[in-house]
Amino acid sequence: MKRLFALFALAVSLFITGCAHTPSAGWVALIEDGKGLENFDRIGDANWRAEGNLIVADKGKGGHLVTKQSYKDFQIYAEFWADHTTNSGLFLRAADPKKIGADNSYEVNIFDQRPGQEYSTGAIVNFASVGNPPPKAGGKWNTYEIYVKGGEVTVALNGAVTVSMNNSQFKEGPFSLQYSTGANNIPGGAIKWRKVLVRSL
């Protein structure tokens, strides 16, 4: 475990240095300055749209923006705004890009009010739980830095590692950005993506 955190700390430091301004060599901007919807396929009925310099969803029963490309070993840097009632997240290495869920991908959650707080914001649902009290993302801008290499998956929210695990159940696939209803099927709060960068390792 100490080795995983050390490797991730190094990766994050190099990552931040390279991403302070414009993405360096190898980084691809999937979402930036309100552009990038063409880089994704849509599943579900979420009302994804460009709004100012953001990509936003705030209505619908739920849906995903699914990358057109498949990824095996990679890093993600994402800047997002979530409401207190937002149910969103990033689903990694999706085995079925037309039917994405926590049972066929690694779900890095954005869901402050999730029933079962151990898998709320910052967790990998069903695989790696967060501490108590769990971190919160609602009502502010946040960053996710995600490192996936072989079985190693590490997540940092706002610069602090929330979970790190070694698991090889899902080996390769696209990743997605989610919008869904909130806890107890109440309407979910908005999710706003300002930047989503990816780099293959």
Image (spheres, helix red, strand yellow):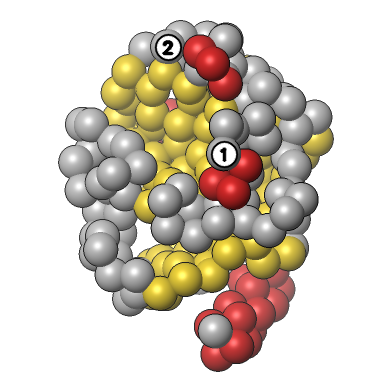
**x 67%, y 35%: residue:** 112
Label placed on residue 61 = 2
**x 62%, y 25%: residue:** 86
Residue of label 1: 116
Residue 44 in the image, given as x and y percentages of width and height: 32, 18
Tell which circle, 1 or 2, labels the residue nearer the N-terminal end: 2
* Residue type, numbered disc 2: Lys
Q: Is residue 29 visible?
A: no
Identify which residue, 118 or 58, lies in the foreground. Answer: 118
**x 67%, y 66%: residue:** 161
Judged left or right of residue 121, residue 63 is left
Real-space Cα separation, disc 1 to disc 2, in angstroms: 21 Å
* Residue type, numbered disc 1: Gly
Q: State whether residue 62 is above or below residue 30.
A: above
Give the quadrant of the C terminus: bottom left
Element under disc 1: loop
Residue farthest along the right direction in this orientation: 140
Residue 150 in the image, given as x and y percentages of width and height: 33, 76
